[in-house]
Image (cartoon, helix red, strand yellow):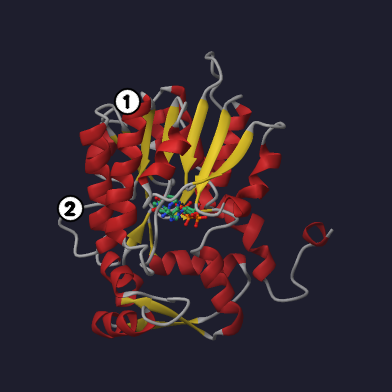
Amino acid sequence: MATISQKPKLVTIFGGSGFVGRHLVQALTKRGHRVRVACRNPNLAMHLQPLGNVGQVHAVQANLRNRASVDRAVAGADHVINLVGILHESGRQTFDAVQDFGARAVAEAARAAGAKLTQGSAIGANLDSPSDYARTKALGEKAALETVKDAVIIRPSIIFGPEDKFFNRFANMARFSPFLPLIGGGETKFQPVYVGDVAEAYARSVDGTLKGGKVYELGGPEVLTFRQCMEEMLEVTYRKRWFVTIPWSVARLQGRILGMLPGRLLTLDQVKQLGNDNVVSEAAIKDKRTLPGLGIAQHSLAAMLPAYLWRYRPAGQFTRKQLL
Ligand SMILES: NC(=O)c1ccc[n+]([C@@H]2O[C@H](COP(=O)([O-])OP(=O)(O)OC[C@H]3O[C@@H](n4cnc5c(N)ncnc54)[C@H](OP(=O)(O)O)[C@@H]3O)[C@@H](O)[C@H]2O)c1
């Protein structure tokens, strides 16, 4: 962990109550910073308070769709981090409202407050993408950089860790289903990155180690296809399952239907995202805008998955240590 020789800062994290947020709060409080967690429902962020000393972490109500609440959450902050992202739309939570206009609201508030800005994005962000998630992530990057010239953009590949929505979801599915679906044969490539490594990169942005105006791409130590990710998950959970290839045309139809049902197991937009590999670009590697470039050691799936997927193993296959 990097040490800092700077005075404690006040850092506002929009979306700090989410998956990456809780690990980032921990990385920042360890450095002695004060953290203001801004989210729509601060009551759901109470679990974060024990991650710091008394008074070091506090939650405030803010909605990226409400400019006044964004301004209040940013007031007095030295650094603002925007971790808000949505996987599917629901009511007024549209991709454009949250990931484009919301990102612009955060950037304008940061500029008005004279605060530094780190904008959370995702590998695959592209203004021309057919996926609304990826297109609005790119618009959010553009809004951040147009408004705050030295903003830092962080684009991770798929993030894994104890609270992830990817490996946990498929490990849970494998408990009940004899089949696992592979859209388009499961050939899409990912570079799964550990949540602690992602949080460390964000914390180093607060340290001032990352270059302003640049886009950093974060991936783990290995590139795996979706199918290989599922194989790794099955090995860790001691299960054998059949893979069923879902042709792209069928997946698109499923996405259209399931995307309208409660729970939104799969959306058309997610199927569109799977059309492109999700790995760190050669340009980012060359410019050292990556985890190794920052000197952050990447945790592998093999090292980290057993620590939290063990609970999906068949009964009787936990180790004694895990049960105690
Ligand atoms: N997880 C991944 O695999 C992954 C991969 C690449 C990039 N990313 C990006 O990394 C960032 C963090 O991801 P995550 O997995 O930590 O997300 P997450 O767990 O879904 O957290 C999202 C956060 O955003 C808040 N939020 C949602 N709508 C909001 C709104 N209108 N106003 C204010 N807050 C709002 C949520 O809290 P409330 O609901 O209480 O408001 C929550 O704290 C996101 O930008 C995501 O797109 C994630």
Q: Residue at x 75, y 66 (%)?
A: 318
In the picture, the disc for residue 219 is none
Image quarter of the N terminus: top right
Indicate the position of residue 45 as horizontal and vertical percent values: 61, 49
| Label 2 CB-ligand 1 distance < 8 A | no
Q: Amino acid at mark 2?
A: Leu
Image quarter of the C terminus: bottom right
What residue did someone put label 1 on?
A: 211
The mark tally for this picture is: 2
Indicate the position of residue 307 as horizontal and vertical percent values: 65, 55
Q: Is residue 85 left or right of residue 51?
A: left
Which residue is nearer to you in this view: 14 or 108? 108
Within 10 Å of disc 1 (Cα), the crowding (few <14, some 14-19, many 20+) is: some
What residue did someone put label 2 on?
A: 127
Q: Quadrant of residue 150?
A: top left
Q: Amino acid at mark 1?
A: Lys
Q: Are marks 2 and 1 in contact (CB under 8 Å)?
A: no
Q: Residue furthest left?
A: 128
- Camera-near label (2 vs 1) is 2
Q: Quadrant of residue 148?
A: top left
Q: Is residue 43 left or right of residue 121?
A: right
Q: Earlier in the sequence, mark 2 or mark 1?
A: 2
Q: Is residue 233 left or right of residue 324?
A: left
SS at mark 1 in the image: loop
Above or below residue 251? Residue 23 is above
Indicate the position of residue 88 as horizontal and vertical percent values: 37, 67
Q: Residue furthest front?
A: 68
Above or below residue 116? Residue 254 is below
SS at mark 2 in the image: loop
Q: Residue at x 53, y 24 (%)?
A: 2
